[in-house]
Amino acid sequence: MSARRSSRPVPVKYWSFAGIMLTYWCSARCASCYLCCGPDRSEWMEVELALRLWRELVEASPHGCKVHISGGEPFGDWDRLIGLCTAAQSEGLGPPAKIETSAFWATDEQVVRLRVGALDAAGMTKLVISTDPYHQQFIPIERARLAARVARDVLGADRLQVRWRDWLENGFDTAALDESERAEVFAKYAIGRRDRYNGRAAALLGPTQQQKPVSDFADSRCDGALLRSKHVHIGPDGRIIPGTCGGIVLGSVSEGTVGDLWRRLEADRARRPVVGRLAAHGPVGLLAEAESLGFAPRAGYAGKCHLCWDIRSFLSSKDLYRDELGPAWMYGPAALAAPGQKNE
Ligand code: SF4
Ligand code: SF4
């Protein structure tokens, strides 16, 4: 398979930075999770499928594709994670540009050293550790600190990324707070950050931020995020998701190769009822139809993605646009509910 090569500008950028999401499972259930991952999810991508997609991603883009591995929590199945990295290396697919983790598994220095060393040997370029008040509702911050210290030791500082370093250095376990104290810390931490107000972040954090009227989001098109960012994720179920837009589907690898799906999107993007309208007009482009079906917007939203999520949730609840809004469970109340209890 080869991507079409032409000198004319392409309306859909090649997917040259792609995340293979090994799973939606996660030990945590962060309020900030724009993909609604959690301990109740059980989807895992088979190594064979991950390798096929990796191959196709690299082949489909004329300049190659940097592939990273994420979730959910890819360290939830260590054998699968290291098996994928090792097989990709044997096939000469290029190193995983990064592997993302919450470090929930970093309970013992020896284990961390062994795993980071094994990923280093399998070619991993960078380890990314996520830490913030939302993660620390579930994962003791000492695990993130241990993983960061050992990874710096094994990989060097340049190959370790911490999101966010301010919290790694000065943060604490928000599990120890009562609910109202935690809500206050969460709301404060979200101010001014580029949180993606989709999924659980829309449901739990969006309403805690300054609310702006829908009119503020008129003419705020989304072609950049949907078609021109070069960044996508592929979920464990094979759905291709724009890099930062949880719950939107650009195609499913059960229907063709990555290159086929990219070409199909380029050809028919403007006719797609969700992606086409969002690209051209932003979430306001979906509003009139939703209102005609009974949707009532809130008085305000934290940002256009918060509004987008609200409208898309409504359309999903009407069982509309299943090809473009999914997976369906992500829009359901169980996925969006506040964490009921500390998990581990
Ligand atoms: S944001 Fe939290 S719940 Fe979501 S995948 Fe990361 S650690 Fe898991
Ligand atoms: S408004 Fe919707 S389509 Fe646009 S960037 Fe946000 S989530 Fe993506």
Image (tube, rainbow, N blue to C red):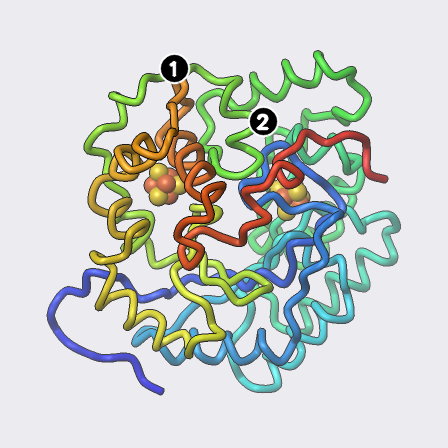
Would residue 197 be visible to someone looking at this image? yes
Read off the residue under disc 1: 299
Q: Is residue 293 left or right of residue 138?
A: left
218 or 12: which is nearer to us? Answer: 218
Q: Is residue 214 above or below residue 49?
A: above
Q: Residue at x 77, y 38 (%)?
A: 139
Percent from the top left, x then y, of residue 191? 48, 20
Q: CA distance from mark 2 to mark 1?
A: 16 Å
SS for dot 2: helix
Q: How many marks?
A: 2
Graded by Cα atoms within 10 Å as few (under 14), some (14 to 19) or many (20 or more), the crowding at tag 2 reads many
Task: Point out the quarter of the image occupied by ligand 1.
Answer: top right
Say which amino acid is labelled 2: Leu
Q: Is residue 38 above or below residue 308?
A: below
Q: Residue at x 32, y 49 (%)?
A: 274
329 or 126: which is nearer to us? Answer: 329
SS for dot 1: loop
Percent from the top left, x then y, of residue 69? 58, 62
Query: Going by the picture, which residue comes out furthest to the left?
Result: 8
Q: Residue at x 73, y 41 (%)?
A: 28
Q: Residue at x 46, y 48 (%)?
A: 319
Read off the residue under disc 2: 204
Where on the picture, by quarter, is residue 9? Answer: bottom left
Say which amino acid is labelled 1: Ala
Q: Is residue 67 above or below residue 319?
A: below
